[in-house]
Image (cartoon, grey):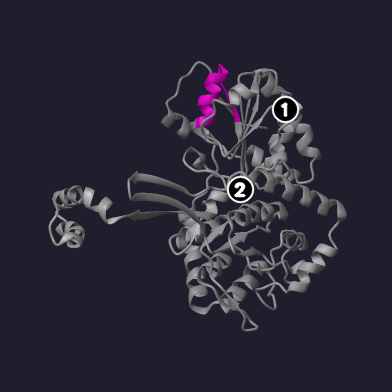
C-alpha cells in the first residue's frame, strides 16, 4: 500500500533528501487568485460579503455572524457528559503545560544608570480558528485558546464555519468547548472570508461591532492558508499550515500493529495527509503493509485513508541504520514524529527538526492531539526546520525598554556619534549631542 524508497547504502545530501522524500503538493500561491477577490470583497463590503460567500461555499446563510450567547450555553448543557469530561481533562493538562511557558520580564544593567528591560506584553485581541470540514475539532479550540489565555490576551474570538445541519451555527461541540473555556465571542464564519473579517472587522447584521484582531491562529484548508498569506502584515499569523503529517522512525523492535494504527490515524484527517515510515527493518515494513491492508478496510473513513496512504505524500523510507534514519527525519521535519526504536528516549534527544516528538510505544500522536498537555497546532510542510508550534510565546510581544540617565548617556555619547558619522547619518549623532550643548567628546 505504501510506496517505498530504498536509501540503504546511500548517503544523500540534505538537498537530495528534501527532493526525494514524500511530500504533499500544496500550492498556496495557486490558491491566491481564488482568495484575493474574497478578501477584497470582505474589505469593501464587510459582513454582507461574508454571508454571501458563506451561502456559496457552506450552503447556509446565518442570521448573524456572532453566535448568540444562549447558543453557547445550550451547547454545553447538551454536550455528551463523556465528551465534556474528556474536554475538561484536555483543558486541565494543556493549562498545566502551557503555564510553564509564560515569559518573565528581565532587566539588564548595562552601565550604572543605564538599563534595558525586555518586557513581555500580550497582543490585545486574537482570532482563533477551528476548522469544520471533513471533521469537527473542539480540541483545536482548546489548543488555541489555552495558550492565549495564559499569555494574558484580553480579547478572544473563536471562529468556525457555520453548519447547515445546525441552523447556520458552528458545530455544537465547538460551541461547547468555547463555553467551557470561558470564551463568549464566537463567529459563524469559515475559510478565506473568516480570515478577512478577522483582519478588517465589520458590523454584524444587528448593528453590533465585530472588532478586528491582531493575530489569527489555527489550521484550515488551502484557501484559509492563502488568505493568511495575503493578509500577513495587517495581521500576525501563527503559520501557513498545510496537510497534517506523521513520520515514524522505527527499527526491528517496533510493533507493526502500533505503527500501522498510527499511520492510519493521521491519514484519517484528509486525502492529502502524509504518513511516512522511516525504518531500518524491511521485515517491519512488510509487516506494517500487511497490517495496513486489514486495518484500512475496517476503519470508518477507509476511502479517505486509502487515498492518503497511497498518495505521493506517504511512503516507507528504508535506511541502513538509525543514524541514517535520524538524518532522514531531520530533513523531512515532520509535524508529528514518533520514535519507536530501542532506547527511544536517547534517539529522540538527537532529533533537531520536528513539530512535536512522541517517544516510545506508549506516546502515540493521538495522545498529543487530545490529552498529553502539549499543543497540537504544529508546523507542517518542513516548516519545523525553522518554526515552532503554537505556544504562549505566540501571543506575546517582546518590547525593549531603554532607561538611561544623563551621566550614562554622556559616557557613551561619543561612541554613538562616531557610529552615526560612519553610517553617514549625522542627525543621529546630533540628536545625542543636542542634549549636551551641541558637542560631545
Residue 153 relative to residue 74: left or right: left
- Residue furthest toward the bottom? 207
Residue 120 at what x, y percent from top left?
A: 49, 53
Asked if the magenta segment contains residue 321, the reply would be yes
Q: How far apart are marks 1 and 2 (CA)?
A: 22 Å
Residue 361: mark in rendering: 1
Please check the rendered image and state whether residue 285 is part of the magenta-colored stretch, yes or no: no
**Where in the figure is residue 48, as x and y percent of width and height?**
58, 79
Q: Where is residue 243 in the image (x, y as percent from the top left)?
A: 59, 47
Of the residues under marks 1 and 2, which one precedes in the sequence? 1
Q: Which mark is residue 384?
A: none
Residue 247 visible, this orientation: yes
Q: In this view, does 5 lie above or below 99?
A: above
Element type where label 2 sits in the image: loop
Residue at x 71%, y 33% (from the top left corner): 363
State yes or no: discs 1 and 2 in contact (Cβ < 8 Å). Answer: no
Q: Name the residue under label 2.
A: 377
Q: Which of these two is toward me, 172 or 209?
A: 209
Q: Residue 276's image quarter?
A: top right
Which quarter of the figure has residue 405? bottom left
Image coordinates of residue 109 in percent, x first then y, are 37, 45
Classify 10 Å Cα crowding around label 2: few (below 14), some (14-19), many (20 and above).
many
Q: Which residues, given as a range, are shown in magenta? A: 316-330
Q: Which image quarter holds the N terminus?
A: top right
Principal secondary structure, stretch drawn in magenta: helix
Position of residue 64 in the picture relative to residue 239 (left or right): right
Amino acid at each position: 500500500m505504501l510506496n517505498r524508497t530504498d536509501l540503504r547504502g546511500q548517503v544523500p545530501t540534505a538537498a537530495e533528501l528534501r527532493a526525494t522524500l514524500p511530500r504533499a503538493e500544496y500550492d498556496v500561491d495557486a490558491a491566491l487568485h481564488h482568495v484575493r477577490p474574497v478578501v477584497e470583497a470582505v474589505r469593501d463590503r464587510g459582513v454582507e460579503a461574508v454571508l454571501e460567500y458563506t451561502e456559496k461555499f457552506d450552503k447556509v446563510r446565518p442570521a448573524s455572524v456572532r453566535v448568540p450567547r444562549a447558543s453557547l450555553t445550550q451547547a454545553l448543557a447538551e454536550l455528551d457528559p463523556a465528551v465534556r469530561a474528556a474536554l475538561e481533562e484536555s483543558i486541565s493538562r494543556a493549562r498545566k503545560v502551557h503555564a510553564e511557558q509564560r515569559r518573565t520580564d528581565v532587566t539588564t544593567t548595562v552601565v550604572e544608570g543605564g538599563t534595558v528591560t525586555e518586557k513581555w506584553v500580550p497582543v490585545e485581541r486574537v482570532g482563533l480558528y477551528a476548522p469544520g470540514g471533513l471533521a469537527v475539532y473542539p480540541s483545536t479550540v482548546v489548543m488555541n485558546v489555552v495558550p492565549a489565555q495564559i499569555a494574558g490576551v484580553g480579547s478572544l474570538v473563536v471562529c468556525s464555519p457555520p453548519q447547515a445541519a445546525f441552523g447556520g451555527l458552528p458545530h455544537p461541540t465547538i460551541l461547547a468547548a468555547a463555553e467551557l473555556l470561558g470564551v463568549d465571542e464566537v463567529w459563524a464564519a469559515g475559510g478565506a472570508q473568516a480570515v478577512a473579517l478577522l483582519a478588517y472587522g465589520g458590523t454584524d447584521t444587528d448593528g453590533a461591532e465585530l472588532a478586528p484582531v491582531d493575530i489569527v491562529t489555527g489550521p484550515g484548508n488551502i484557501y484559509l492558508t492563502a488568505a493568511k498569506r495575503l493578509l500577513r502584515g495587517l495581521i500576525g499569523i501563527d503559520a501557513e499550515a498545510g496537510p497534517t503529517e506523521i513520520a515514524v522512525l522505527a527499527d526491528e523492535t517496533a510493533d507493526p500493529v502500533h505503527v500501522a494504527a498510527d499511520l492510519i490515524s493521521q491519514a484519517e484527517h484528509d486525502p492529502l495527509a502524509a504518513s511516512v515510515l522511516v525504518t531500518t527493518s524491511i521485515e517491519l515494513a512488510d509487516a506494517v503493509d500487511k497490517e495496513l491492508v486489514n486495518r484500512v478496510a475496517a476503519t470508518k473513513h477507509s476511502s479517505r485513508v486509502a487515498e492518503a496512504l497511497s498518495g505521493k505524500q506517504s511512503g516507507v523510507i528504508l535506511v541502513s541504520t538509525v543514524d541514517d534514519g535520524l538524518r532522514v527525519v531531520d530533513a523531512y521535519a515532520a509535524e508529528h514524529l514518533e520514535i519507536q526504536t530501542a532506547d527511544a528516549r536517547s534517539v529522540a534527544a538527537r532529533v533537531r527538526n520536528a513539530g512535536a516528538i512522541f517517544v516510545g510505544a506508549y506516546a502515540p500522536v493521538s495522545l498529543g492531539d487530545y490529552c498529553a498537555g502539549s499543543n497540537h497546532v504544529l508546523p507542517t510542510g518542513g516548516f519545523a526546520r525553522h518554526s515552532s508550534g503554537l505556544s504562549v510565546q505566540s501571543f506575546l510581544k517582546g518590547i525593549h525598554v531603554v532607561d538611561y540617565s544623563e551621566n550614562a548617556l554622556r559616557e557613551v555619547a561619543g561612541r554613538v556619534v562616531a557610529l552615526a558619522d560612519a553610517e553617514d547619518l549625522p542627525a543621529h549623532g546630533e540628536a545625542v549631542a543636542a542634549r549636551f550643548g551641541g558637542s560631545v567628546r
